[in-house]
Amino acid sequence: MARYIGPKTKIACRFGELIFGPDKAFSIRNSSSSRRKKKTSEYGIQLREKQKAKYIYGVLENQFRGFFEKASRSRGITGVVLLQLLESRLDNLVYRMGLAKTRAEARQLVSHKHITIDNNVVNIPSYLVKPGQIIGVRERAKSLEIILDNLIRANHNKYSWIEYDKSSMSARYLYIPERMDIPENIKEQLIVELYSK
């Protein structure tokens, strides 16, 4: 269960956007950065885009490459299929449901066995949820303060591919989102070009 545990604000400043979620130190550090930047090569731009996608979705290189290979074998545009696979991860859907403020928090909820798929406990954050499956909160976890706080703040109608049921604290994954529905600022074509070399 590998994950990135290094400095998050530093990485967010490198990309110039909040890729790990809310960060109080981001605006302060970002504005004070006055170092001259060298011109980045084409390879550097592609590598940077891949790293940004990895950090956003919280996956490391081997797992990300596995997703890319699966996407390249699938029908459709490889870059779009890659993002769709990443969006179908359980930890990402828990985050999109509003049960967690960040994907790292969602990952922890999943690995601590607070989340169910079709009433079966699943503790694998990388589990690929299929359309039609129901993601829920385990009965004993419904009273957790962190989940209740996040649900109060969450906008449950934000993503059209997730149908949230407030009474049961569950959501149905309706369909795999199209590229225009995915809000992440990722240029997936650059990732495809990088792996195609």
Image (cartoon, rainbow, N blue to C red):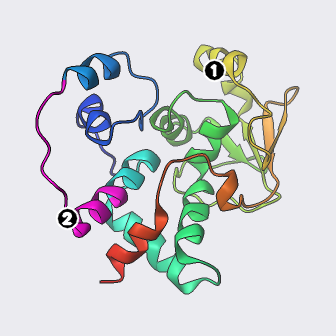
- Most foreground residue, 18 or 126: 18
Locate residue 9 relative to residue 192 in the image: left or right.
Answer: left
Residue drawn 54% across the image and 58% down it: 86
Relative image position of residue 162 (x, y in whole percent): 78, 45
Relative image position of residue 23 (x, y in whole percent): 39, 22
Residue drawn 67% across the image and 17% down it: 153
Span of residues in magenta: 33-50
**Considering the image in quadrants, where does the C terminus appear?**
bottom left
CA–CA distance in space, label 1 to label 2: 41 Å
Image quadrant assignment for residue 51: bottom left
Relative image position of residue 170 (x, y in whole percent): 79, 37
Image quadrant assignment for residue 130: bottom right
On screen, residue 38 above or below 139: below
Residue drawn 52% across the image and 50% down it: 125
Locate residue 109 relative to residue 176 in the image: left or right.
Answer: left
Q: Earlier in the sequence, mark 1 or mark 2?
A: 2
Q: Is residue 1 visible?
A: no
Element under label 1? helix
Circle 1 residue: 150
Locate residue 119 relative to residue 122 in the image: left or right.
Answer: right
- Most foreground residue, 179 or 102: 179
The amino acid on which the numbered mark 2 sits, given as a three-letter code, is Ser
Q: Is residue 160 visible?
A: yes
The amino acid on which the numbered mark 1 sits, given as a three-letter code, is Asn
Residue drawn 36% across the image and 83% down it: 196
Q: Is residue 37 magenta?
A: yes
Determine crowd level at label 1: few under 14, some 14-19, many 20+ residues with C-alpha closer than 10 A: some
Q: Is residue 13 magenta?
A: no
Circle 2 residue: 41
Q: Are marks 1 and 2 in contact (CB under 8 Å)?
A: no
